[in-house]
Amino acid sequence: MSVHVARLTGHNPEITALEWLSTRGLDHSGSKHILKPVARMQVDGPNGCHDILIRPLSWAVTEQAARNFGDGIHIAHGAALGLAYLHSVGAVHGDINKDVLVLCFPELRCPFPLEQLLACLTPTHCTPICPRKDTERDASVPAYIPAALSFEHGMRGALDRLPRSDFICAITGFHQTHVISPDTPVHDTRATYMPPEVVFQISTIGEKGDIWALGCTLFEIFFGERLIDRGIETNTASNILAKLGPLPDSWQTSLGSPNVNHQPDHFHHSSDNFWSQMRERYLNMDLKKLGDPLLMERDASLFIDMMRSMLRIDPSKRISSQDLVEHDWFKLDGEPQDREPKFNSTYVPPTTMPLGVTFMFASAS
């Protein structure tokens, strides 16, 4: 479940993006890898007006989750399918990172904790809103929002017992999703996942920026560490070059800040050296438990090939989301099963809603 603060006279970016996506490309195989709300409510009370989106139960993707619920191949494939869907309808996610990939459990149901939700919306349980850019707030927007919402209802034990076949990987976090356009402004993307074309001020985030961010995210999930360390802009640029090689020659005449030495000799071999080390680490992890040394070698080679194709500095040479979905790494031990989520029921609100709560819609995801 998520709580969104929205002006009644304006819009919430994530809600707007979800409403836009709900009418497009529903026949695309990747559409089910978008975590869509199954219901929406509006709560108008002493703490202001809140938009409430009710989503299927989901769990954050972590390195531990990838190991507990499978070898990670279905997580990576589901994320790729979700991006392919977004790009096919002309949208860019704009903020892919580990926090927006979730494991979705369509068959795991629990009662909607309405009373608990309303209790969390009182000012004593909330934190002040501190908008970074917009200093003027409409009167309908709450002065406070919940610091955190967690409605587990004893589900943690149930999650631990679920077999792999009961989950799919889905994408959420659409607050920066936008239609592909050359005039797209630069968003506040986290430095850890920021693509080189944005770091070096060549262009804004497009489809290939999503691919770069997904590559950084999968690296973090599989290897348990960030590919690009946190830091100021110059450090981000230096970290990219030190691991992934020199900048394209075509960028040299159009570079703005940061002020770094872009082409020292050792950068020309840094990418090969880095991926050679990662290949050895992947082999030692033996995530797929293939057993056969030849299959393990081929698996490692294909995995590194896929990661390199996602993390090329030049976006024009980066793999597309559709080609990523078809990459041979996903097919080494058989075509990955494209799990079909089974939303067999729709959330039905109580017949008597508490004062100030308006149920807005309910639809199958």
Image (tube, rainbow, N blue to C red):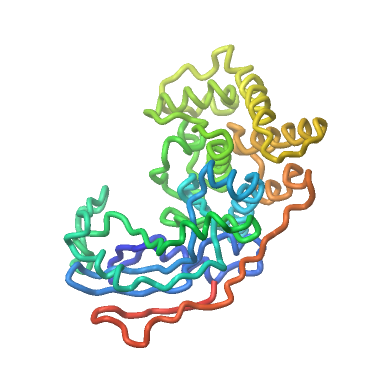
> Is residue 211 toward the left or the right of residue 201 in the image?
right
> Is residue 333 toward the left or the right of residue 172 in the image?
right
Question: Which residue appears farthest toward the top when viewing the image?
Answer: 265
Q: Quadrant of the C terminus?
A: bottom right
Residue 66 versus residue 110 in the image, above or below: above
Q: Name the residue rendered at 21%, 54% in the picture.
A: 127
Q: Position of residue 238 (x, y in %)?
A: 47, 22
Res 297 quadrant in image: top right
> Is residue 6 toward the left or the right of residue 159 in the image?
left
Q: Position of residue 70 (x, y in %)?
A: 64, 48
Q: How many marks?
A: 0
Q: Quadrant of the N terminus?
A: bottom left
> Is residue 72 toward the left or the right of residue 177 in the image?
right
Q: Position of residue 81 (x, y in %)?
A: 63, 55
Q: Name the residue rendered at 45%, 35% in the picture.
A: 192
Question: Which residue appears farthest toward the bottom when viewing the image?
Answer: 351
Residue 93 versus residue 342 in the image, above or below: above
Q: Name the residue rendered at 46%, 63% in the picture.
A: 17
Camera-side residue of 108 and 76 = 108
Q: Position of residue 211 (x, y in %)?
A: 58, 44
Camera-side residue of 188 and 148 = 148
Q: Name the residue rendered at 59%, 43% in the picture.
A: 67
